[in-house]
Image (tube, rainbow, N blue to C red):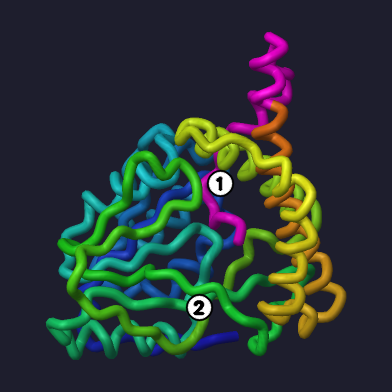
Amino acid sequence: MTHHLASPSPVPISVFLITKNCGRWLDQVLAPVADFAEIVVVDSGSTDETLAIAARYHARIIHQDFLGYGEQKQVALAQCTQPWVLNLDGDEVIDDELRAGIIRLVTEDDSAVTGGLVRFRDWFIGVPASKATRAITRVRLFRRERGRFLSEQIVHESIQLDPGGRIVTLPGWVEHFGVESVSLRTEKINRYSTMRAELDAARGKRHSALKLVTIFPLRFLKNYLLRRAFLSGRRGLIQAMASAYYSFLIEAKKFEAEERARLKLDQPTEATTASVPSPTKELS
C-alpha cells in the first residue's frame, strides 16, 4: 500500500475528471491528490458510488450529459481555478514518485515550462505491465491558461498546448486499471472502435483495403516487439493482440458503414448500444 505524505499547504493544482460509474477505482484515484487545492468532477449520470466518493474528497461536482471526450473535458477544464491543472480519468492512479514530481514542478514554477508528460502502465488480470515495456506517455499536467481540448475530439482526446513552451517528462507512473480483464478490454475495444470509425467518417477518411489486410499484424508487432509487451508474458501477448484487433475493427467498421450506405441497408440495432459512452481512459 502506498502512503502519500500530505503537503503543508494545498498544492496549487486543479485536478479535473470526467466520470460515469467510476466508483470501483475513484477512491484510489482521489486519495493521492486529496491535498491538491481543487478537485473538479464532471459527471454524466453515474448510478454507482462515484458521486458519494467524490463528495468525500470535497470535489466540486457538475452534471453534464456526455458531449464527447474532448468537449466533456473542456467543460471540466473551464471549471478549474488554479494556475496548474492535472487531468485524470476515473480509473487512473498516480504513484508516489509521480505525485512528488508533480509537486516539485509546480512549486519550482519555471516560467518556460507549460506542461508535463506522464507515463501510463496498464494493470491486467491483477498484475501491472512490466516497467521495461515501452510506456505510452501523454501530457496530463499543464498551465491552465496554456491548454485546451477540442470539441471535435469525440474519442482519443489530447491536450492542445499553446506553442513556445517546454514540456518536461515527469518521473513515476499513472497506474491504469480500466482494462484489467479480458471482458472489459473487449467491451472497450468494441465501443471505442465504433466511436473512432464514426470520427474518421466525419473527417472524410474512408476505409483502406490495404489496412484491412496489414493493420492487424503490423499493430501486433509494434506492440508486442517494439513496445516490448512480450516482457509481460502471456498478459502482454493478450494486450498486444487486443490492440491489434482494435485497429482492425476501426477499418472493418468504416468498410461496413460505407457498404451499408452504398447498398442502402439499415443500421443494425446493436450499433446504438455500442455507441453509449462511459468516460474512462482510451485504448492505446
Q: Is residue 279 magenta?
A: yes
* Farthest right residue in view: 234
Amino acid type at circle 2 is Arg
Q: Which mark is residue 119?
A: 2
Which x, y percent locates residue 213?
Answer: 79, 49
Residue interval drawn in magenta: 257-284
* Farthest left residue in view: 111
Q: Is 281 located above or below residue 190 in the figure?
A: below
Residue nearest the observer in this picture, 144 or 133: 133
Secondary structure of the residue carrying numbered label 1:
loop
Which x, y percent locates residue 84?
Answer: 22, 70
Amino acid type at circle 1 is Asn
Residue nearest the observer in this picture, 212 or 81: 212
Q: What residue is pinned by disc 1?
A: 21
- Point out the tag, 1 or 2, that comes first from the N-terminus: 1
Q: Is 254 located above or below residue 14 in the figure?
A: above
Query: Residue at horizontal 40%, vertical 60%?
Result: 56
* Circle 2 Cα neighbour tier, 10 Å, few/some/many (<14 / 14–19 / ≥20): many
Which x, y percent locates residue 104?
Answer: 28, 90
Q: Compute the Cα span from label 1 to label 2.
A: 24 Å
Residue 269's image quarter? top right
Which x, y percent locates residue 164?
Answer: 18, 73
Q: How many marks?
A: 2
Q: Is residue 94 left or right of residue 122?
A: left
Secondary structure of the residue carrying numbered label 2:
strand
